[in-house]
Image (cartoon, rainbow, N blue to C red):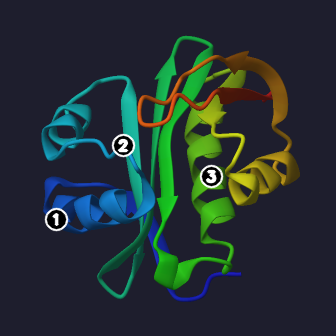
Amino acid sequence: MNEGYIIRKMTERDLDEVMILEHESFSLPWSRQSYESELKNQFANYLVCDIEGEIAAYLGIWVVFEEAHITNVAVSKKYRSRGLGKAIMLAGEKIADEKKAMRIMLEVRPSNTVARKMYNELGYMETGLRKHYYGDNQEDAILMTRFLF
């Protein structure tokens, strides 16, 4: 169900809003320079969910050979619980599938129960643990994988 949004490629014009959402969503936000570099990275694909010109969500995915990796995904607090996280994840998965990836991986904090529930609903399985992954509080990261074949 599309609530008046479009999912499209992220551009440099989106970065002001992306950075606001990045800082709202993460205790270890990426820098603007990181996003500028990612937009030029041949393996990276960045999408935004645009609602009437406002960035409601974004997602980054790398596809390298048979493997895809979700680098980041965020939904604005204003737009949470509307299915936008699932919608942008599915758009990222479509890119991975079109580029012939066999699996998609991501890391998520054990404390992020909302995201973990969504990933489980999308068919991601817990496949590993990265100890002390997050630098702000040394929280582990759960590695989750979804197979596309």
Circle number at residue 89: 3
Residue 78 vs residue 141: left or right? Answer: left
Q: Distance of mark 2 from mark 3, alpha carbons?
A: 21 Å
Quadrant of the image occupied by residue 141: top right
Name the outermost residue toward the front: 137
SS for dot 3: helix
Crowd rating for badge 1 (residues with CA inside 10 Å; few <14, some 14–19, many 20+):
few
> Eyeballing the image, is 72 above or below 49?
above
Mark 1 or mark 2: which comes first in sequence?
1
In the image: residue 66, left or right of residue 121: left
In this orientation, which residue lies closer to the viewer: 23 or 56?
23
User: Image point 76% across, 27% down: which residue?
Assistant: 145
Whichever of labels 3 and 1 marks the residue nearer the N terminus, that label is 1
Q: Which quadrant would the C terminus be assigned to in this image?
A: top right
**Is residue 149 visible from the viewing direction of this image?**
no
On residue 69, the disc is: none
Task: Name the residue tied to disc 2.
Answer: 28
Q: Quadrant of the N terminus?
A: bottom right
Tag 1: amino acid: Asp
User: Mark 1 touching mark 2, by CB under 8 A?
Assistant: no
Q: Return the residue found at the far top.
A: 65
Three-letter amino acid code at the position of disc 2 = Leu
Q: Position of residue 79 (x, y in %)?
A: 53, 81
Closer to the camera in the image, 149 or 15: 15
Q: Amino acid at mark 3?
A: Met
From the viewer's perspective, tell me whether residue 115 is left or right of residue 40: right
Query: Which residue position holds label 1?
Result: 16
Can residue 65 be seen? yes
